[in-house]
Image (tube, rainbow, N blue to C red):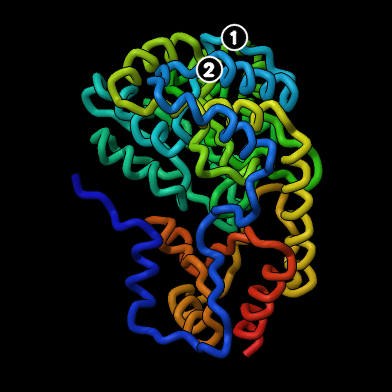
């Protein structure tokens, strides 16, 4: 398999011969990894159940974890799902890589559709699945929304949406999501929304694709799935806790597949994740931190906040030159947009991950403003 170099390795290659200005302390806005402590009640649960490391975990997950996830879906989205409609996963990256291989294995010439620019695991899954790829290009001209071409979608077997979006921070409306659900039924493709940033809304709560499916009259979630992760919402990427939920008939067969791939989460992690999924108050505290960071971005860069995520998709012109100069002159790393896109999408932009406390965020953004103003 010929996989594309990962964006962060490309960044290292881009900057490897540059000596950064040591007058500035090193800072990085490259990785979407929250730099806040995981809440103590989650850490306490991990410690409390550490004696369970001598037990093999079930692939299907413990009932306590499923119950925590189902409580989350009820409290956050008013969704009443059954055990058959959800599978706990080891984060979501593994799902995004192996689910397409499961789904497309028996299709002779599979076709995958996903946004461009994108989270690179989508591309890796397409390569591993030997799938033809159709891009949903996200750019300024379409307000970074996935435009629908029914002639192309008629060929699709699997469509990935990503709303709220990484890297552009765009958010699809309920009406748009309902339209995608209708298309999934009309053209009989499987539709999955990557919802890992759905809890990082800045104003009004953002609905799930599963809410849109119900509103579209598809209450059984036929052909419709979502994934979600605890990493961003709980500042706990090390727990590796996620889920895939929706169409029970698809998940039944996928569960059989998962018994072979060895992605069961250790029991202490499951118990810690369970309490995190079931609680919303700590997530609201983290949201306040991101809201404050976007207020800082407005103050320093004059940028309006998006509806969700902790990313700024900043237009800078030559993004590679900008990235190199920012590192050389101000010892600050950002991620060039072209590393996240194909066929020219992402060029002219850099992605900023506002994952620090406001004071450090302001320091980083002031360095960016200094370069922009030169």
Q: Residue at x 43, y 22 (%)?
A: 189
Per the image, the residue denoted by label 1 is: 82
Give the label on residue 86, or none.
2
Residue 54, how many percent across, how many down? Answer: 40, 24
Give the label on residue 27, or none.
none
Q: Is residue 144 left or right of residue 283?
A: left
- Label 1: how many residues lie within 10 Å, few (<14), some (14-19) or many (20+)? few
**Marks 2 and 1, how far apart at CA:** 7 Å
Image height of 357 relative to 83, above or below: below
Q: Residue furthest left?
A: 1
- Label 2: how many residues lie within 10 Å, few (<14), some (14-19) or many (20+)? many
Q: Quadrant of the C terminus?
A: bottom right
For the residue pair 342 and 39, the one nearer the viewer reads as 39
Image height of 38 relative to 81, above or below: below
Q: Quadrant of residue 300?
A: bottom right
Residue 188, how many percent across, how many down? Answer: 43, 18
Q: Is residue 272 left or right of residue 111?
A: right
Residue 73, how many percent across, how many down? Answer: 67, 22
Q: Is residue 58 left or right of residue 367?
A: left
Can I make out residue 215 in this image?
no
Q: Quadrant of the N terminus?
A: top left
Q: Is residue 164 left or right of residue 133?
A: right
Image height of 202 relative to 19, above or below: above
Q: Residue at x 47, y 24 (%)?
A: 52
Q: Secondary structure at mark 1?
A: loop
Q: Residue at x 41, y 86 (%)?
A: 19
Q: Residue at x 51, y 31 (%)?
A: 50
Can I make out residue 220 in this image?
yes
Residue 272, how many percent across, how many down? Answer: 59, 31
Q: Residue furthest front?
A: 51
């Amino acid at each position: 398999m010929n996989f594309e170099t990962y964006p962060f390795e490309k960044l290292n290659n881009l900057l490897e011969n540059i000596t950064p200005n040591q007058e500035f302390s090193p800072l990085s806005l490259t990785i979407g990894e929250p730099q806040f402590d995981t809440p103590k009640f989650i850490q306490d649960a991990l410690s409390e159940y550490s004696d369970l490391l001598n037990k093999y975990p079930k692939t299907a997950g413990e009932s306590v974890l499923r119950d925590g996830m189902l409580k989350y879906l009820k409290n956050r989205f008013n969704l009443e799902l059954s055990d058959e409609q959800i599978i706990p996963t080891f984060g979501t990256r593994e799902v995004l890589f192996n689910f397409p291989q499961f789904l497309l294995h028996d299709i002779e010439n599979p076709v995958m559709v996903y946004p461009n620019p994108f989270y690179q695991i989508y591309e890796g899954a397409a390569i591993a699945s030997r799938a033809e790829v159709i891009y949903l290009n996200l750019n300024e001209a379409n307000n970074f929304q996935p435009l629908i071409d029914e002639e192309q979608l008629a060929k699709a077997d699997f469509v990935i949406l990503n709303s709220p979006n990484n890297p552009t921070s765009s958010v699809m409306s309920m009406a748009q999501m309902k339209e995608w659900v209708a298309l999934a039924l009309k053209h009989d493709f499987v539709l999955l929304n990557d919802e890992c940033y759905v809890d990082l809304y800045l104003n009004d709560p953002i609905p799930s694709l599963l809410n849109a499916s119900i509103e579209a009259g598809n209450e059984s979630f036929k052909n419709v799935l979502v994934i979600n992760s605890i990493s961003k919402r709980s500042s706990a990427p090390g727990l590796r806790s996620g889920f895939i939920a929706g169409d029970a008939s698809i998940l039944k067969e996928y569960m059989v597949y998962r018994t072979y791939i060895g992605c069961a989460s250790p029991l202490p992690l499951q118990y810690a994740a369970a309490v995190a999924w079931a609680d919303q108050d700590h997530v609201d505290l983290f949201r306040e931190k991101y809201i404050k960071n976007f207020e800082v971005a407005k103050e320093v860069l004059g940028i309006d906040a998006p509806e969700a995520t902790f990313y700024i998709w900043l237009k800078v012109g030559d993004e590679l030159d900008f990235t190199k100069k920012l590192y050389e002159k101000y010892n600050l790393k950002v991620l060039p947009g072209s590393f996240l896109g194909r066929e020219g999408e992402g060029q002219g932009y850099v992605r900023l991950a506002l994952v620090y406390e406001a004071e450090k965020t302001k320091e980083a953004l002031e360095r960016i403003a200094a370069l922009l103003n030169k």
